[in-house]
Each structure stands twice: as C-alpha cells, then as structure tokens.
Image (tube, rainbow, N blue to C red):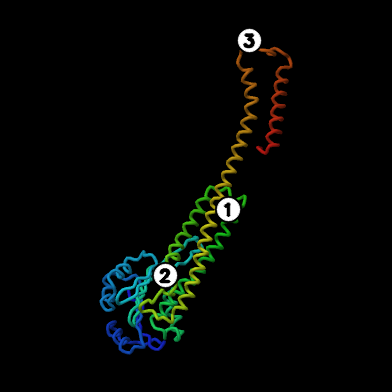
C-alpha cells in the first residue's frame, strides 16, 4: 500500500497532482523538485504501477517485493537501489527485531519500500519536512537522512545489547545463577541475537563506503551528489563504531559461554570427588560387615565377647580418619 506521496520543492512539501505520472513529470519539468513515494509491504499488483512509471529494474523490484535481502547497493541505468535493515531491540524478551527498507533513487524521485515494523521512515520524513535545508538537496538528502537514522539507531541497539550482556555476565558468575541448567541456553540465545544484529550492520559497510567514496570501491555514484560524500563519510564512521561494538559483544559472549562451560566442568569434577569420597567411606564398613557375614564356622573372634563393640569401634575410627583425609584434601 502507498503510505505517502508528495512533491518537495525548494525544501517544502507541495500538494501536486494525484496521478504519479503527472506528479513525476511536474517535478522533472521544474528541475528543483522531486517526488517521494513511500510504500509499506506492497503486493506485486500494487508495485506494478510504480515500476512502470519510474522505470525500475526488474531485479530490484523482485528484491523489494520478496524482502529478506542483505544490505546492498545496486546501480542500474535509471535508478539506484539501496537495501537497509533497521532493527529495534525488544528489551522485555531480549530479542533483536529486524525490519527492511528499500530505497530507489533516480531522476527527481525517491521510492521507499518498508517491510516489518522496525523502520524509521515515518519519523525521517517528519524530521526532514521540518528541515527545509536538507530537503533542498533533493533525493540525496533523503537518502542521507534515511541511512543516518538507521545507523544512529544501530548505536542505540548496540548500547542496549551491551547493558543486557553485562547483566547476563553478572548473573552467570553469581553462585545462585551459575548452577542453573538453563544458563548455557540463555547465553547461546543471546549470541543468536548478536548474530541477527551483525547480519544488519556488517554487510552495510560496503554500500556506505561506496556512498562515502572510500577505498577501492569508492567513486562517483549515480544519482548521488558529490557534495554529499562528507555526510555519508560521517554515517560510515558511525557504522564502523557499531561494527566494532558488535564484534566486541560477540567475542565477549563467546568468552562468557566458554568460561561458563569451564565453570560447569570444574563443578562437575568437584561433585564427582565428593561422590567418590562418600562412596569410599561407605565401602569400608561394608567391606568389614561383608567379611563377617560370610557365615563360615572357623572365623576369628566370632565367639569373642568384645568382638561386636570392637568391630564397631574399628569402623568408626576408619570412617573418622577417612573423613579427615578427604576434608583436608578438599574433597568434602
């Protein structure tokens, strides 16, 4: 469905023709205007009209309809196609919720396609309409505002993940929580959320480098103003910080999982030592009682008056000595 459609002229919103074809023609005729259409999870039939009017490439259209794409930047003859994956963090369920935003940029037009609830487009459009200076840069200004909003929110999500990871680390190494059999599954589930976050942030590095004109992939990008490179460079710097944070979180949660497994192994060894010590203490009286329970006629001290208390005393003495020995060695 089409969420919003408007012409922007000289940094301000104008109510142009209702027909998209007429609106695009008017924007191109003036030269200082552009058309911005926003769609939310469009069907193939709904997107067909937009495709014909703006001459979008079939491969990009297929990606926009199917979604579930990696962040990427594709350059076609008549348009630029950028895929972004905005994310939100559900603090109640400790879950990263990804969305998807596709941006088509061309001659005097911007088409944005949103999938999922994790999208900044509505707030970006509202913020841009309050900043005429940014809108005067045309479609490039819209592209910058969208990427900047998505990446800035990455920083917030990385901070929230770091806070939750600190809490999880404290719980894992506390005596009351560390023995839980669900600890390893909780750590692994958290690692899965970091992986989901990385799928959104890491692949975006190459597209942002292209837009910023950095590295071997840098250079002139069609439909993007050369003067905008410093702005995209700033977004790229923020993205680099996010990726460094995500990498650090991933290493830390792996270390926590390894430390927890080592802790569990040591605890199991302690338990086995305790079990072995108690088994050894139980074996001594069992052995003595077993010998005198064989019912042979010619066994020593069978008819001795003090035999029974003497055997009990020997058992108690041996048990006491074994207890002291195991206690001294830390087995009990």
Disc with the residue nearer the chain's start (2 vs 3): 2
Q: Nearer the viewer, residue 39 or 31?
A: 31
Q: Secondary structure at mark 2?
A: loop
Characterize the local packing of mark 3: few (<14), some (14-19) or many (20 or more) Cα atoms within 10 angstroms: few
Q: Secondary structure at mark 3?
A: loop
| Disc on res. 216 | 2
Q: CA distance from mark 3 to mark 1?
A: 62 Å
- Mark nearest the camera among 2 and 1 is 2
Give the residue number, with chain letter if any, for mark 1: 172
Q: Secondary structure at mark 1?
A: helix
Q: Residue at x 41, y 73 (%)?
A: 218
Q: Nearer the viewer, residue 305 or 8?
A: 8
Q: CA distance from mark 2 to mark 1?
A: 44 Å
Disc with the residue nearer the chain's start (2 vs 1): 1
Q: Residue furthest top?
A: 298
Disc with the residue nearer the chain's start (3 vs 1): 1
- Mark nearest the camera among 3 and 1 is 1
| Disc on res. 124 | none
The correct choice, above or below, for 164 with respect to 39 in the image is above
Q: Residue at x 31, y 68 (%)?
A: 65
- Look at the image and tell me in which quarter the N terminus lies: bottom left
- Look at the image and tell me in which quarter the C terminus lies: top right
Q: Position of residue 175 (x, y in %)?
A: 62, 50
Q: Residue at x 48, y 64 (%)?
A: 90
Give the residue number, with chain letter if any, for mark 3: 297
Figure quadrant of residue 64: bottom left
Characterize the local packing of mark 1: few (<14), some (14-19) or many (20 or more) Cα atoms within 10 angstroms: many
Q: Position of residue 244 (x, y in %)?
A: 51, 64
């Amino acid at each position: 469905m089409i969420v919003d459609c408007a012409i922007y002229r000289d940094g301000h919103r104008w109510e142009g023709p209702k027909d998209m074809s007429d609106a695009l023609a008017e924007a191109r005729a003036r030269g200082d205007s552009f058309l911005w259409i926003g769609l939310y999870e469009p069907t193939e039939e709904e997107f067909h009209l937009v495709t014909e009017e703006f001459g979008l490439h079939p491969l990009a259209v297929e990606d926009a309809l199917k979604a579930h794409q990696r962040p990427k930047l594709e350059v076609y003859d008549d348009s630029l196609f950028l895929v972004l994956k905005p994310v939100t963090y559900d603090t109640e369920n400790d879950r990263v919720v990804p969305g998807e935003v596709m941006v088509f940029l061309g001659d005097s037009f911007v088409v944005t396609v949103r999938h999922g609830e994790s999208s900044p487009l509505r707030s970006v459009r509202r913020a841009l309409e309050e900043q005429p200076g940014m809108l005067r840069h045309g479609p490039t200004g819209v592209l910058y505002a969208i990427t900047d909003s998505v990446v800035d929110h990455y920083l917030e999500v990385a901070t929230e993940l770091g806070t939750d990871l600190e809490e999880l680390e404290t719980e894992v190494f506390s005596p009351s929580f560390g023995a839980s059999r669900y600890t390893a599954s909780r750590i692994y589930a958290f690692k899965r959320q970091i992986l989901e976050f990385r799928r959104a942030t890491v692949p975006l590095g190459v597209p942002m480098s292209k837009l910023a004109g950095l590295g071997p992939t840098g250079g002139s990008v069609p439909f993007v103003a050369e003067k905008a490179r410093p702005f995209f460079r700033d977004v790229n710097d923020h993205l680099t910080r996010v990726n460094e944070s995500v990498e650090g979180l991933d290493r830390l949660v792996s270390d926590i999982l390894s430390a927890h497994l080592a802790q569990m192994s040591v605890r199991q060894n302690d338990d086995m030592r305790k079990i072995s010590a108690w088994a050894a203490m139980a074996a001594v009286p069992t052995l003595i009682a077993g010998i005198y329970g064989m019912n042979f006629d010619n066994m020593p001290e069978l008819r001795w008056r003090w035999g029974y208390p003497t055997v009990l005393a020997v058992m108690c003495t041996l048990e006491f000595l074994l207890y002291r020995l195991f206690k001294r060695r830390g087995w009990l």
